[in-house]
Amino acid sequence: MITTEAKGLRELGTSIFVAMGSEKKNAELVAETLTEANLTGHDSHGVWYYPVYSQRIKDGWIKPHEHPRIVKETAASAYIDGHWGFGQSTAMLMMETAVKKARETMVAAVGAYNCNHIGRLGFYTDWAARNNIIAMMFANVGNPLVAGFHSTKRTFGTNPVSISAPTQDGVFLMDYATSLVAMGKVNVARAKHLKIPISWSRDKDGKPTEDPNAVSQGGWLMPFGEHKGYGLQMVSELLGAVLTGSRASMDGDKGPPSPNGVFCVTVNPEAFVGLNRFKEKTSEVIRVIKSRPSEPGEEVLVPGDPERISKEKRLREGIPLPEETWSQIVKLCNEIGIDASIAVKVS
Amino acid sequence: MITTEAKGLRELGTSIFVAMGSEKKNAELVAETLTEANLTGHDSHGVWYYPVYSQRIKDGWIKPHEHPRIVKETAASAYIDGHWGFGQSTAMLMMETAVKKARETMVAAVGAYNCNHIGRLGFYTDWAARNNIIAMMFANVGNPLVAGFHSTKRTFGTNPVSISAPTQDGVFLMDYATSLVAMGKVNVARAKHLKIPISWSRDKDGKPTEDPNAVSQGGWLMPFGEHKGYGLQMVSELLGAVLTGSRASMDGDKGPPSPNGVFCVTVNPEAFVGLNRFKEKTSEVIRVIKSRPSEPGEEVLVPGDPERISKEKRLREGIPLPEETWSQIVKLCNEIGIDASIAVKVS
C-alpha cells in the first residue's frame, strides 16, 4: 500500500484533468469527488478513476471541454443534456439546480441524459443536506451486471440510490448499490483466492456459485433484499434511465462505458414541519437508535456514519492506495509530465 | 373460510361507516380501500378493519365526520392536517393534490399529520400511476414493532414505502413494509403452530428465536435487506413522521392506535422524456425481465404483478375471509342493524 493524502490527491487530479483538456473548475470538481470517495471509504469510486477517465477522454467518450445544459425547465423542474462532458459536472449542476429550485418552490425534480459516470451519488446528496435540503438521487448504470429477482442474465446495472437529510450536527446519508454486493467485493475475494457466499452471484448458466471468477466469466450479481431490493433496483432503472431518456442498462455495452442516467428530487423542510424541528427530531431519532446496541458496548451505526468515520481516520492517517492503483496513476503522470509525488503522504 | 365478493363488501363497508357517523363519500372511500386490499391479496390491510375502525370510532380515535385540511401550500407543495378523520380521506386528498399539482408544476410534495391509519399505500400510488403520474409514498407507523440494524427493541413501525409508475398496459407498483416480513406472516405461523425462520425476529431479550409468539411477548421484527433495508426504514421514519411533524414510531403507544405520518412526491414524465416514451420503454424493460426466467417456464414477476394476479382471481372466484374475521363483521352488523349477507358470494 502507498499512503497518500487528500489535499495532494486533489491537486494531482486537478493537474491531470487540466492536462487532458478540462477547465480548471471542472477538473477540480472531478478530483474532489473521486478523492472524497476514497476519504469516505468507497475506494471502488475513488482516484483509481484518474487513469480510467483519462483513457475515456483519449477514446473520445468523455469530452472534458463540454458543459451540461438545461434543455427544458419549469420553476420546479429541469431536464439536462450532459453533452458527454464529465458526469460530475452534470450531476453537480443537477443538484445545484434542484437545491436552488427547492428553496423557491419547496420541491424540485431534475433529470439528466448524455451523462458520463458521475461517481458516488452520496457526494451530491450529502452536499444538498449540508445546504439544509432533503435529497433523493436515483441512477442506472448503462452496462448490465445484475439480474432481476427470479430472473437471469445481466439486466440491470448496480443501479444506486441515495437519500439524504440534514441533522443537527451533520447529515443522514443513505447511499448504496441495489445489487447485494458491489462488484468490488467480488474482485477483492478473487484477488485473495477466497470463495464468495452463494447468495452473491450466479455463473453464466444461472447456477449458484462460490467462485469469484464466475461473474466476470459471463455470470451476474444478484439484487439485495430479495423482491424488495429488486423493486428498488427497478425504480433506479425507471427513474434514472427511462424517465431521463438515457441508455437503459439492458441496452448493452455499445457507446460510452458506464454512463449514468440520473434523476433527483429535492425537498425543503420549510414546506412542512420547518428546518429546525426537522433537524432536532431527526437527531433525536438517531440518538435513540444509537442507545440500543444489540451487543453491549457495540456502536450502532446509522446511514452516513461509516463514511464519516472513514473520513476522520483518513484525513488523519492518510488514504491507502494499492500498489497497482498507484502505479497506474504514476504511469499516467509520467506520460503527461506531472509529478505524482505531491499526493504521497510524508510522515 | 367464507367466500365474499368485492361489490357486496364495498356496499357493506359503506353502510357500516355511514351508520357510524361518516358521510357517504368518505364511507365509500374507506370501504373501497379496504376491499381493494383483499382483492389485491393484502388481507392484512383488508376488511377485517371494518370492526377495528368501528371500535376506534367508538373510542373517539377516528372522527368520522372530520375532514383533512391544507394548512400550508405553495404551487408545488401542500401540508395537510388530517384532523383525525379517516386516514384514507387524508391520504386520498394528499394524492389528489399531489397529482393535480404535478400536472401544473411537474413535481409536487405533500405531507400530512394528525392522520389515522391509511391502509395500503399502494392504493394511492396506483391511483396516481393510472393518472399518468409517477408517485412515491413514505409512511411511518406510530407504534414501534421493528428494531434498527444491529440495534435492539421496538424502534420503528413497519414503515412502508411505495413507488409507482405508469406503463403501457397498467402500472409498475412497488409497495412494501421495510420489516423483513409483515406481522401478519408471524401471526399465520402462530395460528398454525409452526416455527418461523430465525432471521425474522428477536425475543424480548434480543435473542434470535424461531418462536412465533416471541414478538407479541415483547420481542421485535427485523428490518429487510440488512443495512440497506434499514436505511430505507429510516427514510420512511424521517419523511413520514419527522418531516410531517407526526408521532415518531419510537414515541410509543399513547394516543391513537396505529396512526400514520405520510409523505408523498409526484413527478410528471412530461418534464423529462415525455409520457408516451416513458410508458413504452418501461413496458419494454418489463418485457425483457419477463423473458428471462431463472427456471424454464416459470413466470418472472415485476412489482405490481402479484396484486394484479390476485385481483383477477378474486374478482372471478370471490374473496375468502377467515371465519373469525367474518364473525367479527357479522357481530358488528347485528349491533348496528345491517344485513351482512349482502357481502356473501352466491355461487
Image (cartoon, coloured by chain):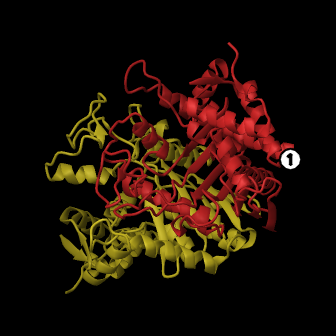
Chain colours: A yellow, B red
Q: Is residue A75 left or right of residue B138?
A: right
| Residue B339: x %, y % from top left | 77, 29
Q: Quadrant of the C terminus of chain A?
A: bottom left
**Residue A232 sits above or below residue A328 on the image:** above
Q: Secondary structure at mark 1?
A: loop
| Residue B163: x %, y % from top left | 60, 47
Front position in the image: A310 or B23: B23
**Residue B144 sits above or below residue B25 on the image:** below
Q: Chain of mark 1?
A: B
Count of picture labels: 1
Q: Is residue A118 left or right of residue B127?
A: left
Front position in the image: A188 or A342: A188
- Residue A24 in view of the camera: no
Instruction: Estimate how packed mark 1 is, as few (under 14), some (14 to 19) or many (20 or more) residues with alpha carbons within 10 Å.
Output: some
Front position in the image: B221 or A72: B221
Residue shown at the point (76%, 64%) measured from the top left: B81
| Residue A52: x %, y % from top left | 35, 58
Front position in the image: A190 or B182: B182
Q: Give the amino acid at mark 1.
A: Glu
Q: Quadrant of the N terminus of chain A?
A: bottom left
Name the residue beneath numbered marker 1: B23
- Residue B60 in view of the camera: yes
The image quarter containing residue A104 is bottom right
The image quarter containing residue B228 is bottom left
Residue shown at the point (44%, 54%) measured from the top left: B229
| Residue B328: x %, y % from top left | 63, 37
